[in-house]
Amino acid sequence: MTTPTVLTKDHITFIRKADRISMHFNASQSTDSATLRASTANTDAEMPITCRVQFSLYGPNNHHTPRTCFGYIGSAHFDRTWASVAQLLKAGDTLTLHWIGDSNGYVRVATFGGNSEVEAYHSLHMDKLELSIHRTQGKRPIVLTFTINVSICPMNSARMIQPAFTPTPTYSIGRIQ
C-alpha cells in the first residue's frame, strides 16, 4: 500500500505559490494512490504529492476501477475554492482525491433517455473530483472536503474519469442497436 505524502511547510509554500494544479490517477502505475502536482509557470518547477485515492462510480459499466482519472486547475490563484484549500493546509496534513463518476442520473439520460450499455456510451457523463484534507487535532481526526472540479461531457478522451471498460456500440442501418 502506498503511503500518502505528509505535507511539510515547504510543500504548503509551494502549493500556495503554484499557478497550476493537476491531479492524476493511472491504474497501470498504482491502484491505491494518485498524484497532485503543483507547478509554476515562470520556472516550470513541479512538486508531486502522493494522495490517497477513492472512487464512487455510478451508472452502467462503472463497477471497475477506472483506467485513468484527471483534474486540472489552470489558474490556481484565481480559483476561489483552491485558494481556500491552499490557505487551510497545515504541516502534517495528508490528502485524498475522490473521483465520483456519473453522479447525476439526469445528465446520464439527457441524450437518449435510457440506460442500456450502448446508450450509456453515447450519453453525457457528470464526473466530479473532491479533495479531502486529513489532520489530527489532539486525538480527534478532522476531515475537510472540497469539490475541486466538475465535468460534463460525452464518453471521449476529455472525460475526467476514463473507465476500465468502454462498451463498443453496434450499428445497423444508421441506428444504434
Image (tube, grey):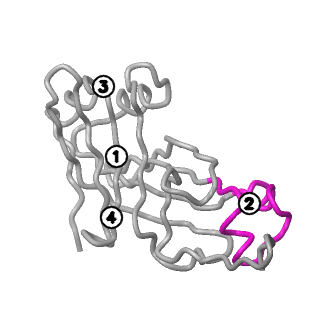
Q: Which residue is mark 1?
A: 137
Q: Is residue 48 magenta?
A: no
- Label 2 near label 4: C-beta < 8 Å? no
Q: Which residue is mark 2?
A: 108
Quarter of the figure with the N terminus? bottom left
Q: Which residue is mark 3?
A: 19
Q: Which residue is mark 4?
A: 26
- Label 1 near label 4: C-beta < 8 Å? no
Q: Report the amino acid beneath label 2.
A: Arg
Q: Position of residue 47 (x, y in %)?
A: 17, 40
- Upstream in sequence: badge 2 or badge 1: 2
What is the secondary structure assignment of the residue under circle 2?
A: helix
Measured in 3D between alpha carbons, the distance from the residue under mark 4 to the one under mark 1, in whole angstroms, is: 32 Å
What is the secondary structure assignment of the residue under circle 3?
A: loop
Q: Position of residue 18 (x, y in %)?
A: 27, 27
Q: Is residue 120 magenta?
A: yes
Q: Report the amino acid beneath label 1.
A: Gln
Q: Report the amino acid beneath label 4.
A: Asn
- Upstream in sequence: badge 4 or badge 2: 4
Q: Write down the region rendered in magenta.
A: 104-126
Q: Measuring 28% from the left and 72% from the top, which residue is drawn there? A: 28
Q: Report the amino acid beneath label 3.
A: Asp
Measured in 3D between alpha carbons, the distance from the residue under mark 3 to the one under mark 4, in whole angstroms, is: 23 Å
Badge nearest the viewer, 3 or 1:
3
- Upstream in sequence: badge 3 or badge 1: 3
Toward the viewer: 52 or 125?
125
